[in-house]
Amino acid sequence: MASSDPVTVTPVAGKADLKAFVDLPWAIYKDDPNWVPPLKDEVYGLLTPGKNPFHEHADHCYFLARRGDAVTGRISAHIDRLALTMPPEQGMGPGTGNFGLFEAKDAQSAAALIAAAEDWLRGQGMTKVLGPISLSIWEEPGLLVKGFDHPPVVMMGHNCPIYRAWIEAAGYGPVKTLNTYELDITQDFPPLIQRIIQSGEKNPRINIRKVDKSRFDEEAAIILAILNDAWGRNWGFVPITDSEVAFTGKKLKPIVFEDLIRIAELDGEPVAFMMTLPDLNEPLKPLNGSLFPFGWAKLLWWLRRPKCRTMRVPLMGVLQRLQSSRMASQLAFMMIEYIRRDAVARYGSTRGEIGWILEDNQGMVAIADAIDSHVNKSYVIYGKPL
């Protein structure tokens, strides 16, 4: 392959192309100490209709860029039909397509891939594009623009810093910034927050309980109902289907621990929840994408008695009717504190990461600020009219 060779972009066709699509990041990030190799079986499952229920309401085309016989990039173009039904003022809506799973070795390959994705979306009748979103807004949205100096936590993305310039050169502008916040969880929260928590503990109307893993499906349904209500007006929101809940639940069940997920009840009614996951990326990183020959044993041993530095809060929600109230923030602080205590005492954790949080989500930003956390990573979702 010579740098003067022309770039060709073709849709993924057949097993060899799909393998090249999945394998490419290992070549791109081989010298990046902060990239965490995903399990390849998980990536195949994400991409494959019939395995990932996202495809039940989405259409897609995957593309590869080549110079000669060498693969130099990849991208997905996809349309989430549920996103098309959302109000346009919430970011998605009619005519909105997406690109994602973007990787490239050079600027020419990047430009050709983005152009191919846009052409496919236009051919499907789309009038604007948001990306990168890989593949669902609930999976890995946004391009990393801050925080390249440390690895991402479980279910968050990592990419080359140069991608920002390549995407912006293709005519894209920032639409939303998603931030993650980190904090030292070995430290007590400020006195004001402690007083708010203590006040809540004296309120007989409030009950903060652990989830019951023996009633996994029932608890998942409670959390989903709160989530869809709490996040329903958020920018980028797309409803989660029952089959997606089941699919995600099956994947996450091994790292679901009862003391790390709390449901807040007010007068006996579930009104808020907080989900915390041990950072699976810590044991995954040395496995280099494969559970064989001995990776599965190491992972199973870790899952039996996980000890990890970082805990991630990927999801948190309070019913809309309580949002912007004192009760909402009190419930949030109580759940955070109870999980913080157990994370330190039972799992040896020292660091928490909350997010992603929309930059303009004033309620969640205020909570993050109140517990002395700070932004450690920022991801940008870009947009462009087609």
Image (cartoon, helix red, strand yellow):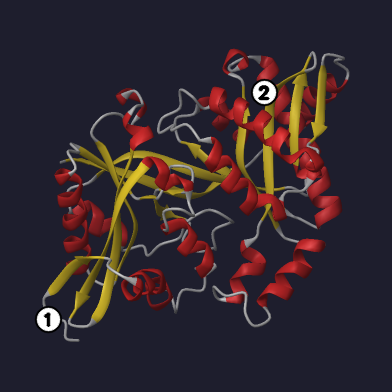
Quadrant placement of the C terminus? top left
| Residue shown at the point (53%, 62%) measured from the top left | 42
Q: CA distance from mark 1 to mark 2?
A: 58 Å
**Residue 333 appears in the figure:** yes
| Residue shown at the point (16%, 86%) measured from the top left | 2
Nearer to us: label 1 or label 2: 1
Percent from the top left, x then y, of residue 355?
56, 43
Residue 329 numbered tag: 2
- Tell me which amino acid carries mark 2: Ser
Between 317 and 336, which is closer to the camera in this rendering? Answer: 317
- Note whether 67 is above or below 163 in the view shown: below
Quadrant placement of the N terminus? bottom left
- Note whether 342 is above or below 175 in the view shown: below
**Residue 36 appears in the figure:** no
Percent from the top left, x then y, of residue 77?
28, 52
- Note whether 34 is above or below 205 in the view shown: below
- Tell me which amino acid carries mark 1: Asp
Mark 1 nearby-residue class (10 Å; few <14, some 14–19, many ≥20): few
User: How many circles with numbers are drawn on the protein?
Assistant: 2
Disc 2 secondary structure class: helix
Q: Would you identify the image quadrant in which residue 195 lies? A: top right
Percent from the top left, x then y, of residue 111?
18, 61
Left or right side of 232 for 271:
right
Q: Would you identify the image quadrant in which residue 161 lies? A: bottom left
Comes first in the chain, label 1 or label 2:
1
| Residue shown at the point (35%, 43%) measured from the top left | 58
Mark 2 nearby-residue class (10 Å; few <14, some 14–19, many ≥20): many
Q: Which residue is mark 1?
A: 5
Left or right side of 7 for 368:
right
Q: Residue furthest front?
A: 50
Left or right side of 280 for 155:
left
